[in-house]
């Protein structure tokens, strides 16, 4: 009975360690692949089809939220149609690497260029928000309403699957 209890305790500690550390480790590996320009590693850690779909739907939602006159709605529809090809060109291993390295790629900005004091922004403090066992989001700790990167569990690892604008 003691061995079973010890085994269960060990399994619980192992799971707790994985639950706490795996999102940070996944983010670290993704950032490292971006810094190194390793397209193959990025392709392992990013579901590009899901990321494109997420970004297109977010842009459609943002564009659709801007109501107004019929002319503005027509402009919004045209912009919505043009969003797909633009997203396809941005959501590539190179585009994701640029987003992670520089904090911006096209319309997506995950960290400001300058800090509040006017100096270059350093690596931001990131906040990991867990959504159960299968998803977590990464946002800037000090930025309210900033875009979030969405990761989904893939086996025991994590894959970037979306952006929440």
Image (spheres, rainbow, N blue to C red):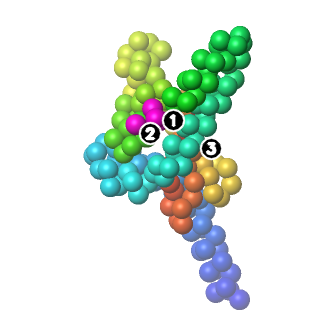
Question: Is 55 positioned to the left or the right of 64 in the image?
Answer: left
Question: Is 65 positioned to the left or the right of 75 in the image?
Answer: right
**Which of the two discs, 3 and 1, labels the residue nearer the N terminus?**
1
Expressed as whole percent of the image width and height from the top left, the position of residue 130 reads 64, 48
Q: Are marks 2 and 1 in contact (CB under 8 Å)?
A: yes
Q: In percent of the image, x 57 and y 58: which residue is there? A: 153
Specify the quadrant of the image occupied by residue 79. top right
Specify the quadrant of the image occupied by residue 98. top left
Majority secondary structure in the magenta region: helix
Residue 81 in view here: yes
Expressed as whole percent of the image width and height from the top left, the position of residue 140 reads 53, 32
Q: Which label lies toward us, 3 or 2?
A: 2
User: Which stretch did the figure color magenta?
Assistant: 84-89
Q: Is residue 6 magenta?
A: no
Expressed as whole percent of the image width and height from the top left, the position of residue 11 reads 61, 74
Looking at the rendered structure, which numbered label has been put on residue 84?
A: 1
What whole-number distance in Å separates the C-alpha atoms at marks 3 and 2?
Answer: 27 Å
**Mark 3: secondary structure:** strand
Q: Are marks 3 and 2 in contact (CB under 8 Å)?
A: no
Q: Which residue is mark 2?
A: 88
Residue 97 in view here: no
What whole-number distance in Å separates the C-alpha atoms at marks 3 and 1?
Answer: 28 Å
Q: In percent of the image, x 34 and y 41: which residue is there? A: 94
Q: In percent of the image, x 67 and y 18: which residue is there? A: 73
Question: Is 8 positioned to the left or the right of 56 in the image?
Answer: right
**Which of the two discs, 3 and 2, labels the residue nearer the N terminus?**
2
Looking at the rendered structure, which numbered label has been put on residue 129?
A: 3
**Mark 2: secondary structure:** helix
Quadrant where the N terminus is found in the figure: bottom right
């Amino acid at each position: 009975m003691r061995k079973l209890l010890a085994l269960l305790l060990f399994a619980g500690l192992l799971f707790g360690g994985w639950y706490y550390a795996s999102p940070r480790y996944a983010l670290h590996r993704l950032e490292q692949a971006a810094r190194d320009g390793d397209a193959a590693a990025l392709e392992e850690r990013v579901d590009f089809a899901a990321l494109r779909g997420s970004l297109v739907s977010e842009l459609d939602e943002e564009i659709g939220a801007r109501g107004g006159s019929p002319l503005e709605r027509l402009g919004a529809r045209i912009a919505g149609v043009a969003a797909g090809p633009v997203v396809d060109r941005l959501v590539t291993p190179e585009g994701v690497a640029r987003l992670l390295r520089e904090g911006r790629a096209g319309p997506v900005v995950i960290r400001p260029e300058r800090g509040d004091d006017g100096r270059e922004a350093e690596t931001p403090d990131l906040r990991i928000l867990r959504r159960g066992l299968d998803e977590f989001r990464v946002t800037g700790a000090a930025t309210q309403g900033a875009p979030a990167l969405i990761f989904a569990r893939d086996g025991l690892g994590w894959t970037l699957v979306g952006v929440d604008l």
